[in-house]
Image (cartoon, grey):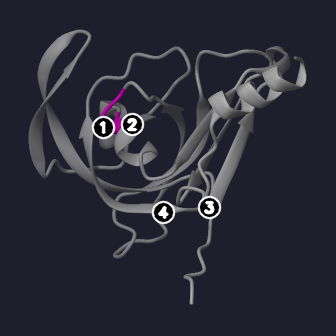
């Protein structure tokens, strides 16, 4: 008998083309001990980031205590950052619990407190579309049973026009 899966998905739409994929998420410092203590924050989905990070400001607001440190590398070079434990509730109501998340400065005009990196994105399917000059992105965990290929879809459309 095959396993029945529950898929957790959401879609964010913009009435224009955007370079920034933003959604709201909820973070919990310790959902097991204090499930009512959380913060709703703006998240930027960043496929160029290997790891999810939060802002120094959010760490202070939630009174998070570093549990470790690590070296990260980026466009500006390498730096040592604090690591905290934090649960993240995505817009699809899926909890990513007790995640080790880095803390560093996030310079953003969009007032972002968390960058969702590939350490979370890789657990599901992530899709971006700019059809009609309007951006939409969607995300689902777990990955869908059949992979969606833009190349195959383009080939089908090209065959129809020949």
Q: Quadrant of residue 53?
A: top left
Q: Are marks 3 and 2 in contact (CB under 8 Å)?
A: no
The residue that mark 4 highlights is 95
Q: Earlier in the sequence, mark 3 or mark 2?
A: 3
Above or below, 73 relative to 2: above
Residue at 35 percent across and 49 percent down: it is: 62
Q: CA distance from mark 2 to mark 4?
A: 15 Å
Q: Quadrant of residue 73?
A: top left
Q: Circle 3: is it few (<14), some (14-19), or many (20+) Cα within 10 Å?
A: some
> Relative to the observer, which residue lies in front, 77 or 142?
142
Which span is picked out in magenta?
A: 49-54
Q: Mark 3 or mark 4, which is nearer to you? A: 3
Q: Residue at x 12, y 21 (%)?
A: 79
- Which quarter of the image is occupied by the C terminus? top right
Residue 162 seen: yes
Does the stretch in magenta take in 50? yes
Residue 122 colored magenta?
no
Work out whether mark 3 precedes mark 1 in sequence or the reverse, and give the earlier one.
3
**Mark 3 or mark 4: which comes first in sequence?**
3
Disc 3 target residue: 8
């Amino acid at each position: 008998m095959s396993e029945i899966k529950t898929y957790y998905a959401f879609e964010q739409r913009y009435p224009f083309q955007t370079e920034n994929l933003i959604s709201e998420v909820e973070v919990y410092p310790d959902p097991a001990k204090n499930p009512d203590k959380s913060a709703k924050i703006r998240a930027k989905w960043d496929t160029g980031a290997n790891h999810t990070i939060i802002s120094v400001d959010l760490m202070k607001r939630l009174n998070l205590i570093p549990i470790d440190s690590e070296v990260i590398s980026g466009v500006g070079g390498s730096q040592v950052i604090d690591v905290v434990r934090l649960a993240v509730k995505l817009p699809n109501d899926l909890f990513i619990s007790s995640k080790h998340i880095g803390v560093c400065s996030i310079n953003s005009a969009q007032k972002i407190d968390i960058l969702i990196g590939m350490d979370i994105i890789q657990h599901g399917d992530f899709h971006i579309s700019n059809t009609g000059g309007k951006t939409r992105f969607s995300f689902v965990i777990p990955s869908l049973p059949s992979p969606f290929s833009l190349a195959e879809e383009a080939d089908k459309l090209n065959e129809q026009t020949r």
